[in-house]
Image (cartoon, rainbow, N blue to C red):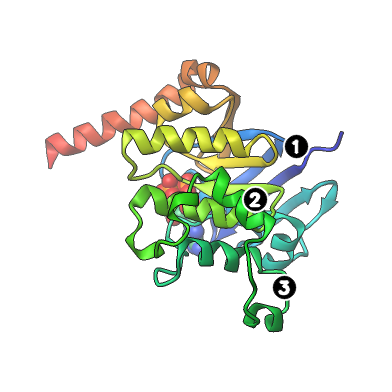
Amino acid sequence: MTALLEVRDVSVVFDGFRALDGVNFTVDHGELRFLIGPNGAGKTTLIDIITGLTKPTTGTVSFDGSVINGKREHQRVRLGIGRTFQTSVVFEELTVLENLDLAASFRRPLVSLLARRKGVTEKVAQALETTQLTDLAGRKAGVLSHGQRQWLEIGMLIAQGPRLLLLDEPVAGMSADERARTGELLTEIAKDHTVIVIEHDMDFLRRYASTVTVLHEGKLLIEGSVDEVRADPRVQEVYLGRAREEAAHDVVS
Ligand SMILES: Nc1ncnc2c1ncn2[C@@H]1O[C@H](COP(=O)(O)OP(=O)(O)OP(=O)(O)O)[C@@H](O)[C@H]1O
């Protein structure tokens, strides 16, 4: 079977700087893939070339067997590629339900958006259930806790019916309980979606990741299970070497 996503030999050059350098990255249908790497490794750039925010300088991106290099961002959303951003996109004055409803209606024409509709659509009901936000449906998004807001954003993505979800550091700033609940949420979502998650937290990876891809200085360093990746001397050097450099810097400064 064709992979859902295939990034082939992609390089991205910004003003002479290689943010990605000959990256090959394949994700199969139904995978929950974690993407890690130190600051500046190219993780966000890789997500950006998948969503169409950035164009690769060379190489191809294929989705479900078709090359999508020429497609614009909104066209890729329609194909089923959805992402969350590090910055929030919820409307604070709207309720959880209204935010989900708005996200779910992105394919509908404006007139039907303006017409008041009764009831909750199946997609919205499903997003509420998956994210366990049903009890908060009537609450304004502005009063949600950090964790609940992140779950709402993930719910808004699910409500759009994507096939591939790209999540940028979904557990950043969360408490231990919120992290655990997010891990379970990702596992649940991955039952009927393909998910790529950028995450740094090794404890979180150990609990919820099966395959991990490590980027370093724009190149794919290694791909494997959490244990394989953690045991790799290059990964240890990239992370521990950084920690040593920062510790030395702290001592000097
Ligand atoms: N639009 C741009 N113009 C110039 N350089 C850029 C641009 N976007 C990213 N870069 C550079 O490309 C490199 C990779 O950036 P990227 O944001 O992809 O890394 P990252 O792995 O996501 O890092 P972080 O964990 O810090 O978010 C960095 O050195 C960054 O400064």
Looking at the picture, tell me which residue is in the foreground, 103 or 219.
Answer: 103
Q: Amino acid at mark 3?
A: Arg
Callouts 1 and 2 close, C-beta under 8 Å: no
| Placement of 70 over or under 135, stated as above or below | below
Callouts 1 and 3 close, C-beta under 8 Å: no
Which mark is on residue 108? Answer: 3
Which mark is on residue 219? Answer: none
Which image quarter holds the N terminus? top right
**For the image shown, how many numbered marks are present on the structure?**
3
Residue 228 image offset from top left, x and y in percent: 54, 17
Q: SS at mark 2?
A: strand
* The quadrant where residue 236 appears: top left
Looking at the picture, tell me which residue is in the foreground, 198 or 208.
Answer: 208
Left or right? Give the position of 212 relative to 175.
Answer: right
* N-term-proximal mark, 1 vs 2: 2
Which mark is on residue 11? Answer: 2
Which image quarter holds the C terminus? top left
Callouts 3 and 2 close, C-beta under 8 Å: no
Numbered disc in front, either 1 or 2: 1
Which mark is on residue 29? Answer: 1
* N-term-proximal mark, 3 vs 2: 2
Q: SS at mark 1?
A: loop
Looking at the picture, tell me which residue is in the foreground, 18 or 206.
Answer: 206
Is disc 3 surrounded by few (<14), some (14 to 19) or many (20+) residues within 10 Å? few
Residue 239 image offset from top left, x and y in percent: 39, 29
Q: SS at mark 3?
A: loop
- Residue 12 visible in image: no
What whole-number distance in Å separates the C-alpha atoms at marks 3 and 2? 36 Å
Residue visible at 72% across and 61% down in the picture: 76
Q: Amino acid at mark 2?
A: Ser
